[in-house]
Amino acid sequence: MFHGRTRTRLVGCLFVALAATSAPAFAVEVSDHWTLGGAIRARVDHDGSRDIREFGIDTVMLNAKYTSDSWLGAAGYRFYGKDYPFQYTRRFGDISFADQAWIGYRLDAKRHLEAGLNQVPFGLQPLFGDTFYESLGNVVGVEDLSEIGVKYVQQLDDWNVQAGYYARPAWSGQGTSRGSTYSIVLTPADPSVDGGTRNVERNLFIGRLAHNVQAGGWKGEAGVSLFTSTLRNLDTQRDGRRLVYGAHYAGNHGPWGMKLQYARQLMTPKNPDGSQLVTLGGFDGTFNLATRGNLYSVNASYAIPGSYLGGWVKDITLYSNYSRYQKSNPQFRDTQRWITGASFSLKFLSVYVEWLEGRNDPYIGGSNYAQSLGAGGINRWKGQLYMNIGYYF
């Protein structure tokens, strides 16, 4: 049985009550320009092989948006803790960090600038797939990546052009680890990480070019991305380089959807021992990553129209995502992730139900968290059930 703590039962009752009695979820319009919102999310984790049967609070999110004829902006902050997988903390909120904090200016109807903590424009936006758990692109530091800098965005007929300069990653939030950011970024290793490095990323330059395409009934976009940055090693005080380039495609044909992402990552850190590893961090943890590799992500989806059970269930999407980080070092074992699931609206709740399979995956199946994306961990497929239930307001 799931852990029978009183607070866990209260979480379940809260979500049932929201589904049954809430008015439609909406953000609060404070003025003509300001909108405030957020979310309360719960999660279920079930892995019988590791005796994991957990249900508890996942996240509390607070968001603010500003929009006018000339100015725009957004800010968001997230809180975690106490429940799995952060059961080692004493209180909910012991882990917290910003996911965005930026202001923008509209140059005209098709061009604008963003400054602050905003999403780096690499590859498929905003995510590489339809899954809640995200692809391996996230844990190798190229998907759902936000850093501090300036971004230019322009829509020119069928072309979308984005370019940016990012001085540094996000400010550190609160947690028990040096990896206390929302995005997965280069981070000095925690003392517990064997073979960990102490690199930080600075001066990231990036460009993304995408074009609307249509072929055989499929409509979508295809594009390319490139970024380069400086890797400052805090031990040697020398600078290495990071280069990532990629190509993507996203399209729809009726209810069918397809998303493809490729990225090549090349890092040359100036580690004191010359190792082919760097340490990344985020979500209150740090782990090693092979410095060179190819990332592949393939996502297929099918949207089911209509509503069911008297209108309680609607917006159903079935999806499957496979991603792989193919490491260039032949002595390192590749990391793979396969997620199959469904998302839908249950009354006014947003629900994702997913079966997660991982191989040498730091987050799935109990593999070696610190080393799976480096030399490797459990070199066989391990799976678990995951569910996320959110009320957005």
Image: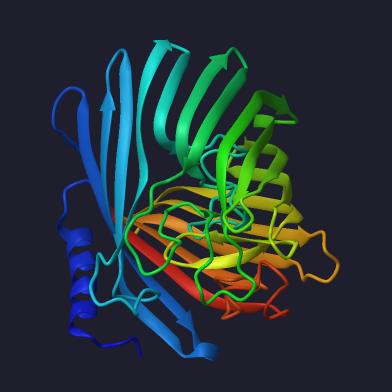
- Name the outermost residue toward the front: 236
Query: Would residue 160 appear left or right of 222 to someone viewing this image?
Result: left
Between 104 and 27, the one nearer to me in the picture: 104
Q: Residue 111: image x %, image y %?
A: 47, 14
Query: Would residue 194 appear left or right of 152 to someone viewing this image?
Result: right
Q: How is the image coloured?
A: rainbow
Q: Residue 208: image x %, image y %?
A: 63, 29
Q: Residue, x 72% and y 80% (percent of image)?
A: 380
Residue 326 sits in quarter: bottom right
Which corner quadrant holds the N terminus? bottom left
Note whether residue 355 is visible.
yes
Q: Residue 310: image x %, image y %?
A: 30, 56
Between 197 and 244, the one nearer to me in the picture: 197
Q: Residue, x 45% and y 56% (percent of image)?
A: 343
Q: Residue, x 48% and y 57% (percent of image)?
A: 132
Query: Would residue 260 appear left or right of 187 to someone viewing this image?
Result: right
Between 55 and 68, the one nearer to me in the picture: 68
Note whether residue 347 is visible.
no
Vertical relation: 9 (above or below) 40? below
- Name the outermost residue toward the top: 108
Number of numbered discs overlaid on the protein picture: 0
Vertical relation: 255 (above or below) 193? above
Residue 45 sits in quarter: bottom left
Vertical relation: 17 (above or below) 293? below
Q: Residue 53: image x %, image y %?
A: 41, 84
Between 107 and 255, the one nearer to me in the picture: 107
